[in-house]
Image: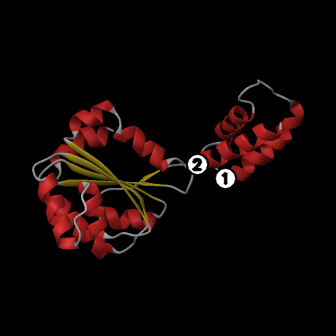
C-alpha cells in the first residue's frame, strides 16, 4: 500500500508482482489492495484482468479497455488512449507466460501514459515475476501460513456450528495441517470436508 500510494506517482510505470504457490491467497490479497478506499482515491482508473495461460496482448488490452476491438495494434492504441494522462492501477491476475517480448510490448504501451501507472500482478512463477519487473523492482513473495494458523482455519470450518475441542481429534488435526503444506485454501477445504463427517 505504501509503495502504491507514496512511490508510484513519481515513476513512469511501477510493476509489482505478488508471487506464491497456488492457494496462498495472492488474488485475495490483491483484491484487498484494489478495493481499499485510499487506493480508489489515488488512481483515476482501475482495471482487473484475469490472464491465466494465454498471454495474448490484444485480448489483455481489450479486456482492460472493456471493449471488443480486435487486432493487436488497434487494441494497444485504444489502451494507450484510455490511460493517457491518467494515474491507473491495472491488475493482471494469474500470469504464467515467460515470453519477455510480449511483456515488453505491453509495458511499452503502458509507459506512454505519463507518471503514476501501476501494474499489480499475481503469479506462481518467480521467473515470470523477474521478467515482468525487468530488474526494476523486487517481487513480493507471499509466505505459507504457519501450522498454528492452518489449524485455526481447519477447526473453525470443521466446527462452525459447534465448539468442540476433543483431545482425540488433535492427532487428526495435526495430520491434516501437515497435508495443507502452508495453504489456507487447503485448510478451508479440509475443514469443510470434516464438517460434513464430524
Q: Secondary structure at mark 2?
A: loop
Question: Would you place residue 11 above or below residue 77 in this image?
Answer: above
Q: Secondary structure at mark 1?
A: loop
Q: Is residue 59 rendered to the left or right of residue 182?
A: left
Quadrant of residue 58 in the image? Answer: bottom left
Numbered label tally: 2
Between 186 and 61, the one lying in front of the other is 61
Who's the residue at 72% across and 45% down the image? 190
The x, y position of residue 21, in whole percent, is 54, 57
Q: Is residue 197 rendered to the left or right of residue 54?
A: right
* Residue contact at pointers 2 and 1, CB within 8 angstroms: yes
The answer to whether residue 135 of the structure is visible from this angle is: no
Q: Is residue 66 rendered to the left or right of residue 96?
A: left
Identify the mark nearer the N-term, 2 or 1.
2
The x, y position of residue 111, in whole percent, is 17, 59
Q: Which mark is residue 144?
A: 2
Q: Residue furthest right?
A: 168
Q: Is residue 167 rendered to the left or right of residue 146?
A: right
Quadrant of residue 66 in the image? Answer: bottom left
The x, y position of residue 192, in whole percent, is 71, 41
Q: Residue furthest front?
A: 68
Q: Which mark is residue 181?
A: 1
Amino acid at each position: 500500500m505504501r509503495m502504491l500510494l507514496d512511490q508510484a506517482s513519481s515513476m513512469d510505470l511501477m510493476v509489482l508482482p505478488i508471487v506464491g504457490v497456488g492457494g496462498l491467497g495472492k488474488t485475495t490479497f490483491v483484491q484487498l489492495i484494489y478495493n481499499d478506499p485510499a487506493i480508489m482515491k489515488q488512481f483515476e482508473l482501475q482495471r482487473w484482468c484475469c490472464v491465466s495461460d494465454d498471454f495474448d496482448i490484444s485480448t489483455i488490452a481489450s479486456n482492460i479497455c472493456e471493449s471488443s476491438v480486435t487486432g493487436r495494434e488497434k487494441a494497444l492504441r485504444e489502451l494507450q488512449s484510455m490511460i493517457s494522462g491518467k494515474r491507473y492501477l491495472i491488475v493482471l491476475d494469474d500470469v504464467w507466460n515467460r515470453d519477455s517480448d510480449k511483456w515488453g510490448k505491453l509495458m511499452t504501451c503502458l509507459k506512454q501514459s505519463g507518471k503514476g501507472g501501476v501494474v499489480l500482478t499475481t503469479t506462481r512463477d518467480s521467473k515470470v515475476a523477474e521478467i515482468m519487473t525487468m530488474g526494476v523492482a523486487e517481487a513480493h513473495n507471499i509466505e505459507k501460513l504457519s501450522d498454528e494458523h492452518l489449524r485455526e482455519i481447519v477447526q473453525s470450518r470443521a466446527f462452525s456450528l459447534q465448539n468442540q475441542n476433543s483431545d482425540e481429534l488433535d492427532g487428526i488435526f495435526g495430520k491434516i495441517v501437515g497435508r495443507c503444506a502452508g495453504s489456507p485454501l487447503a485448510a478451508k477445504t479440509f475443514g469443510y470436508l470434516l464438517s460434513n463427517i464430524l
